Image (cartoon, rainbow, N blue to C red):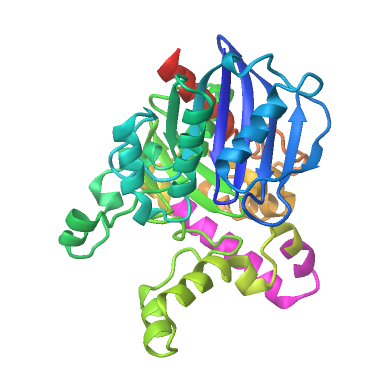
């Protein structure tokens, strides 16, 4: 079975084509068509294990971008399909599903209407996600499309976790509550960690840590989320590349009342100018780590990142009543050796000791804690596209 996975952003179209046979998923091609509707659109394409190819293209909108992608997939020299009819299912990343979706959903008019209804909750993400779906419906008539929601895995949270302590009418009338994000990644690494460690997914207690430019944690018990750090939007929780994470709501009021900022200015500061960038001048953790050796502000930004991360891990350890494992994933979790070193060494209070010899390889599955540690710390590379493909096959096969 050939499965196409699509992640449509505001000016990008990321894709992976899988060949599925039973439980095996082979990547046939993957890439990204970037700068759609902007200057100098570019197609990054990779077939199998071959090197990446960059091509300048003309892509004024997502429909044209998908046409370009499809032409590449059936190209006699570089393609992986004889005809587009080989694609039997299409999976789409959709950022926000609100309370309507606790599982992936096969796309129909009602599902599209629900995605549209969540646009106020994810104005930068849901509209392009919908564009990707409608473009695929046009290009692949009759082929089932499946929406896989970033928020779905977190909908097992109870009211004690997802309510904000504001007037209940704001929840009832406007849906103001915690939803959580990165759910596809958290679900993937939870199941992968259980398999790797020999844990029963129905009973395991794992704190999953998705650490990248965007960061979030989830406390997962028996495959259900008890709490997660991101909120109604992806702004809450940990210190991130450019996002502030948790902040006193009074700061927002101060910026508006005392500094005369409007909503757009506050939004730009908290989402685009804060986090590691705002504190230390670098949004990329690699640059922050390099600069912190000689500069105070990057060092303080790094320490703040670790401090906030430790605090949430500790609180989730308490919420779960202990944990079998703490799992690190995402660009930072998988690849930043200094961040992993600093974090695990600070987890001694939970009976965890770093195996320094293990913390020498990036991008690989490995246990970082010593065998006598009370809690296992595991690095587990995430694969959100594979998770989307698996969810898609489960609904269409």
Looking at the picture, does residue 286 appear above or below residue 25? below
The residue lying furthest to the top in this view is 22
Q: Residue at x 69, y 60 (%)?
A: 284
Residue at 68% from the left image edge and 54% from the top image edge: 339
* Residue at 71% over, 19% down: 80
Q: Is residue 335 above or below residue 236?
A: above
Looking at this view, is 56 or 26 the one in front?
Answer: 56
Q: Quadrant of the C terminus?
A: top left
Residue 316 appears anywhere in the view = yes
Residue 315 placement (x, y as % from top left): 41, 53
In which quarter of the view is residue 250 placed? bottom left
Q: Nearer the viewer, residue 263 or 133?
A: 133
Q: Quadrant of the N terminus?
A: top right
From where the camera sits, is residue 199 visible? no
The furthest residue to the bottom: 258
Residue 88 drawn at (x, y percent): 52, 16
Left or right of 232 in this view: 328: right
Does 40 sit above or below residue 298? above
- In the image: residue 345, left or right of residue 99: right
In percent of width and height, residue 243 lies at 54, 64
Q: Which residues are magenta?
A: 288-314
Please tell me whether residue 8 belongs to the stretch shown in magenta.
Answer: no
Main secondary structure along the magenta-highlighted residues: helix
């Amino acid at each position: 079975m050939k499965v196409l996975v699509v992640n449509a952003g505001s000016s990008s179209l990321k894709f992976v084509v899988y060949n599925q046979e039973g439980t095996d998923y082979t990547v046939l091609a993957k890439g990204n068509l970037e700068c759609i509707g902007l200057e100098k659109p570019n197609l990054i394409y990779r077939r199998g294990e071959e090197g990446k190819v960059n091509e300048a293209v003309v892509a004024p909108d997502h429909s044209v971008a998908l046409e370009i992608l499809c032409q590449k997939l059936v190209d006699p020299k570089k393609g992986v399909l004889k005809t587009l009819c080989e694609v039997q299912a299409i999976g789409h990343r959709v950022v926000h599903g609100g309370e309507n979706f606790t599982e992936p959903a096969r796309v129909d008019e009602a599902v599209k209407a629900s995605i549209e209804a969540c646009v106020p909750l994810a104005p930068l993400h849901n509209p392009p996600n919908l564009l990707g779906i409608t473009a695929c419906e046009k290009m692949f008539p009759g082929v089932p499309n499946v929406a896989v929601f970033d928020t779905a895995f977190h909908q097992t949270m109870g009211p004690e976790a997802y309510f904000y302590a504001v007037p209940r009418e704001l929840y009832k009338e406007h849906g103001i509550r915690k939803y959580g994000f990165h759910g596809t990644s958290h679900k993937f690494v939870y199941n992968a960690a259980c398999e790797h460690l020999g844990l029963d997914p129905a009973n395991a207690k794992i704190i999953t840590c998705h650490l990248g430019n965007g960061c979030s944690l989830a406390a997962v018990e028996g495959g259900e989320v008890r709490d997660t750090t991101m909120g109604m939007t992806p702004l809450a929780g940990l210190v991130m590349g450019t996002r502030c994470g948790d902040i006193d709501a009074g700061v927002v009021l101060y910026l508006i009342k005392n500094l005369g900022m409007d909503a757009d200015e506050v939004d730009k500061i908290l989402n685009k100018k804060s986090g590691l960038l705002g504190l230390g001048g670098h949004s990329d953790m690699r640059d922050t780590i390099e600069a912190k050796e000689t500069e105070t502000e990057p060092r303080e930004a790094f320490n703040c990142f670790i401090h906030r991360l430790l605090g949430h891990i500790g609180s989730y350890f308490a919420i779960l009543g202990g944990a079998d494992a703490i799992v690190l994933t995402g660009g930072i979790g998988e690849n930043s050796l200094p961040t992993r070193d600093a974090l695990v060494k600070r987890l001694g209070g939970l009976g965890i000791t770093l195996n320094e010899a293990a913390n020498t390889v990036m991008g690989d599955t490995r246990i970082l804690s010593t065998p006598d540690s009370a809690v296992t710390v595991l690095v587990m590379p995430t694969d959100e596209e594979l998770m989307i493909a698996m969810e898609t096959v489960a609904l269409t096969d």
